Amino acid sequence: MALLLRTFARQGVCLSKPQYSFLYRHAAPMGTTAKDEMNKFWAKNARLNRPMSPHITIYQWSVPMMMSITHRGTGVGLSGAISAFAVAALVLPGNYPYYLDLIHSLSIGPVLIGLAKFGIAFPVSYHTLNGIRHLYWDIGKGFKIPEVYRTGYTVIGLSIITSIMAIAMI
Amino acid sequence: MAAIIRLSSVCRRGVKPLFYQSTLLARPLVVPNKYQEQPHLLTARIHSSQALYAGSDSKAASLHWTAERVLSILLLAMGPVAYFSPGPAIDYSLAAALTLHGHWGLGQVLTDYVHGDTKIKIANASLFVLSTVTFAGLCYFNYNDVGICKAIALLWSK
C-alpha cells in the first residue's frame, strides 16, 4: 500500500481527484490547528533548552535568500519610516514646509542629497519590484530555479535603474 | 497497460512480477501527462472534504492571504494615480492602503519570529497600537498639512 502511494507520488499524481479518495479514506483528520502545532513545537524545544539550529551561520548564502531577507528588511524599514513620519506629524509643532526649509537651510551638497534620495528611492523601488515577483509566484509561476534567478536579477537591475532615474529626473 | 509500463520505468529497484498482477492495479489510472498541462490544479486539497475534516475548517487564514494579495495589487495601482492625479482622495486612500499593508506585513514578521502565547499577544497588541497611531498621524497630515502626494513632490524638488 505504501509502495503504491509512493509510486503515485513519484509520478506526480494529484491525490485530490475523486477516484484517488480510496487511498486516504482511512486517514484520520488532525484535531489541532497549525497554530497549536507551532506553539507546541516552540514550547517543547524551549522547555528542553535546545539550541537553535545554526541555519544562517553555516548555510551558504544564495541570491534568492539575500533577496528574500532584503525584501523583508526594506518592508520593515519603510513601515518604520512611515510610522516615524506619522508620529512626527502628530507630535512636532509647525508644518511640513517649515521642516523642509529647515533642511534646505542646512545647505547639504548635491552628492549627499543624491545619496539620501537614493536611500529613499531604492528601498521603495526594490520592495515594489520584488513584491511584483512575489505576486508572480502567488499565481503559481516562475518557481523553476533558473527562473527564480532570472527574475531575481531583473528585479535587482530594474531597482537600481529606476532609483537612479528617480534621482536624475523630477 | 500504459500505466503498468510507466510504473515499471519508475520502479527501478526490480519489483517482483507478482506485483503487476495485484488487483490494486486494476483501477483506472489517469495518464500523468495530463497534469503537466494544468499545473495550477495540482494544489493538494486533501482537507477540503467535509467527511474527513473533523477539526476547525475556518477559512479565515486563506481569506486573509487573499486579502493581503488584493491589497498589494491595489497599492501598486495607487502609485501611478498618485503621480498623475494627486489630491485628497488619493492621499487618504494611500494612507489607508500603506498602513494596512504595513500592518499585515509586520504581522507576518511577528508570526515568524515571536513565540510563546503571552509574547505573541503583547507583540500583536503593540503592532495594533502602532498601526492605529500611524493611520491617525497620516490622516492628520492629510487634513492639516500639505498631504502625502504634495509632501513627496516637495521633498523631491529639493
Image (cartoon, coloured by chain):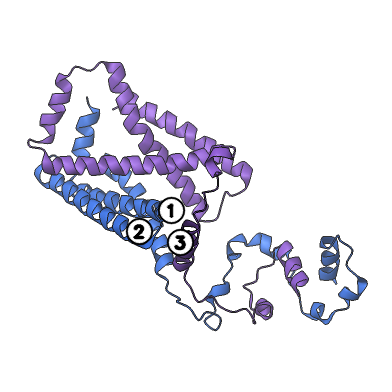
Chain colours: A purple, B blue
Is B57 placed above or below A39 here? below
Residue occupying image coordinates x 43% and y 46%? A131
Q: Residue B45's x, y, as percent?
A: 57, 71
**Residue with the mark numbered 3:** A43
Label 1 to label 3: alpha-carbon separation: 15 Å
**Disc 2 chain ID:** B
The type of residue carrying mark 1 is Asp
Name the residue at 25% across, 48% down. B94
- Report whether mark 2 lies on the same chain as mark 1: yes
Give the residue furthest to the bottom: B51
Query: Left or right: A23 with respect to B22?
Result: left
- Mark nearer the viewer, 2 or 3: 3
The answer to whether residue A98 of the structure is visible from this angle is: yes
User: Quadrant location of the N terminus of chain A?
Assistant: bottom right
Q: Amino acid at mark 3?
A: Ala
Q: Position of residue B115 (x, y in %)?
A: 41, 57
Going from N to C along the chain, the mark reached first, 2 or 1, is: 1
Label 2 sits on residue: B120
User: In terms of secondary structure, where does tag 1 sit?
Assistant: helix
The three-letter code of the residue at mark 2 reads: Ile
Front residue (pair B110, B41): B110
Which disc is residue B22 wearing?
Answer: none
Q: Position of residue A37 (x, y in %)?
A: 49, 66
For residue B112, the mark is 1
Say yes or no: labels 1 and 3 on the same chain. Answer: no
- Crowding at dot 1, Cα within 10 Å, few <14 / some 14-19 / many 20+, comes out as few
